[in-house]
Image: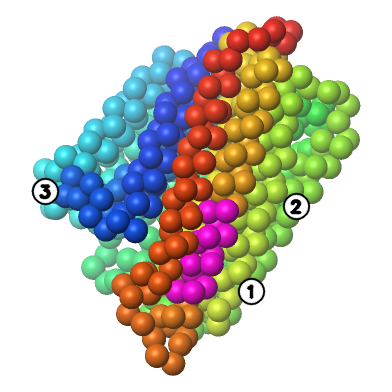
Amino acid sequence: MQYKSQAVATPYFIAAIGLFVGQIIFGLIMGLQYVIGDFLFPMIPFNVARMVHTNLLIVWLLFGFMGAAYYMIPEESETELFSPKLALAMFWIFLVAGALTIVGYLAVPYATLAELTGNDLLETMGREFLEQPLITKVGIVIVALAFLFNISMTVLKGRKTSISLVMLLGLWGLAVFFLFSFYNPTNLVLDKFFWWWTVHLWVEGVWELILGAMLAFVLIKVTGVDREVIEKWLYVIITLTLVTGIIGTGHHYFWIGTPEYWQWWGSVFSALEPIPFFAMTVFAFNMVNRRRREHPNKAATLWALGTGVMAFLGAGVWGFLHTLAPVNYYTHGTQITAAHGHMAFYGAYVMVNLTMISYAMPILRGRAANSNKSQVLEMWSFWLMTISIVFITLFLTAAGILQVWLQRVSETPLSFMATQDKISLFYWMREWTGVVFLIGLILYIASFFVKGEDKAAA
């Protein structure tokens, strides 16, 4: 059954994809700056391009999660959203605040932006991924609280399911751990220690709960497998996620001045982190194999299966490659970290958002699925983006291995910049593969506009 208030998810999904395009464009700009150092300088310096690239990633994923919650929760709770008007008001506030922040990064020097936005009142700026001005951070908290109030009230007045409760736990966790972005101690060890409480406990903690809930919701819809079966899998996955993810935070504490025991705790528990992702892959394929109906939206099913596989490869396998302390001693801060980051974010969070948008948008437009012609184009976009991210990861891994050898292991180590010159071929290959990724993303967007014989109305 469809609920009228689910329509508020539409602007969130559209904004998410628009910001995703921006993120990839700035990624390509950065990629060129790796090999052509003065490209777009001084208009867009590298540090600014990097800030915009990573901030757009975070913001568009949040838009996707919020849109997914507004779509899923009414259906799971079997009741209309508590306040569609509040959801739309928060959408515009979040979008305008996000856009103004990006304009601020691009228009004025970062130090000037800090002065203009009250950073002297509470110093929160200047840290990777948390570069947002104080005003923006406060705005994010207000938007998050209004969103959580709306979602929580909807769940309270309707049916309670495991999927909606796991989603709520993930979303509340997201908001709570963001509060550590306001804590910026002058001691660098303390700063880094608690900085990871936002950055790590988001992407390797509560975001994984959101991922699990979204994947479970779509798999119930496209396979027709009993809810009880899917919910049991979901509980196993989130338990493994929380146990390994929370203690696995220690793999960031190896070399920042924390006690030595973190090398053991971090190594052991982060080595176990691939297990929930492997379970997620088995879960997705198992549910599709046991399906009791052929859903007309084949593209959404493909995205759901791809999420499990790529999350396991990116977050699981590539994370494990450099997570043990004796290995990390040589690899931390190299292109191996970047390789893991690119595939992990794509596999776990980009793909699950695209899965939800692929499933929900046709229904929000009054049909069960897009036309066959549209779905073929969307499947092309899936393979172009997925194969290109695999090659981006492989090229960055090769660059990282060479970087470790030339700069850190060799008996005659080279300087950082001399090493970068030696591995520039891999940066060029990464750049061209990034262009292919952008083409895949454009095809994904185009697939929603392709005319053809529509599937039966939802």
Give percent across and percent down for residue 113: 15, 45
Placement of 51 over or under 407, stated as above or below: above
Instruction: Identify the secondary structure beneath mark 3.
Output: helix
Look at label 2 and name its amino acid: Ala
Q: CA distance from mark 3 to mark 1?
A: 44 Å
Is residue 193 toward the left or the right of residue 300 in the image? left
The answer to whether the residues at label 3 and label 1 have Cβ atoms under 8 Å apart is no
Foreground of the two, 27 or 458: 27
Residue identified by numbered label 3:
112
Q: Earlier in the sequence, mark 1 or mark 2?
A: 1
Left or right position of 354 against 225: left
Kindly identify which residue carries mark 1: 268
Amino acid type at image mark 3: Thr
Camera-nearest residue between 150 and 267: 267
Q: Main secondary structure of the magenta part?
A: helix
Is label 1 in contact with label 2 (beta carbons under 8 Å)? no
Label 1 secondary element: helix
Residue at numbered disc 2: 279
**What residue is at 63 percent from the left and 36 percent from the top?**
382
Magenta-drawn segment: 391-403
Q: Amino acid at mark 1?
A: Val
Label 2's element? helix
